Image (cartoon, helix red, strand yellow):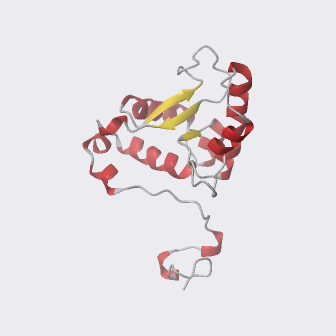
Amino acid sequence: MAKGNPKIPEYVYDVDVSLLSNKFAMLVPELFESKSFQNLTIAARLLYIILCVHKASDMQRACLKNALEDYNRIFDLGMSEGQILDEAMPNKRTKYTSNYFVFTTKHMEAYGLKKNYVTKLMKELKEKGFIKVAYGGKGRYGGWNTNVTVYQFSNEWKK
């Protein structure tokens, strides 16, 4: 059995299991079977999967917390410190998971992705209802583009 997780046989991985993160994303068959997902370009499908996994990363959560604090301070969203923490950090006590995430240039580079191409793919994901802008960019608070854009996963693609 594997060193990191006794329930997973070692032959499942090509790498040392102790190096693997405990972060993962559960993607349901309904997503892959849907015509909406199948109509995305292959690159947009891959980016969506990357975003799902990225949402659980510690690097993303720290950036999300900072972005939500900035938007709350500047636009007086009425979010308490506790609400910001609930949205940005995992809460094991309440089992609450936020739909918010950020995907900055720093994150793109960490995954070996080019900003111009990601921007095009994010536009496709927004147009097809897989993600939406929550704060920043050309979303709800469209006049202020210098801050990080906060996105949300959306279920509009199911309609």
Q: How many marks?
A: 0
Residue extending furthest toward the front: 94
Residue extending furthest toward the top: 143
Q: Residue at x 50, y 82 (%)?
A: 9
Q: Quadrant of residue 20?
A: bottom right
Q: Is residue 124 above or below residue 87?
A: above
- Tell me where residue 14 appears, x and y as whole percent: 53, 74
- In this orientation, which residue lies closer to the viewer: 79 or 105? 79
Q: Residue at x 41, y 43 (%)?
A: 43
- In this orientation, which residue lies closer to the viewer: 74 or 96? 96
Q: Quadrant of residue 129?
A: top left
- Quadrant where the image shows the N terminus: bottom right
Left or right, 55 with respect to 42, comes to right
- Tell me where residue 92 appears, x and y as whole percent: 63, 58
Residue 16 visible from this viewpoint: no
Q: Residue at x 52, y 28 (%)?
A: 133
- In this orientation, which residue lies closer to the viewer: 71 or 9? 71
Left or right, 128 with respect to 114, comes to left
- Tell me where residue 13 appears, x and y as whole percent: 51, 74
Q: Residue at x 36, y 34 (%)?
A: 156
- Quadrant where the image shows the C terminus: top left
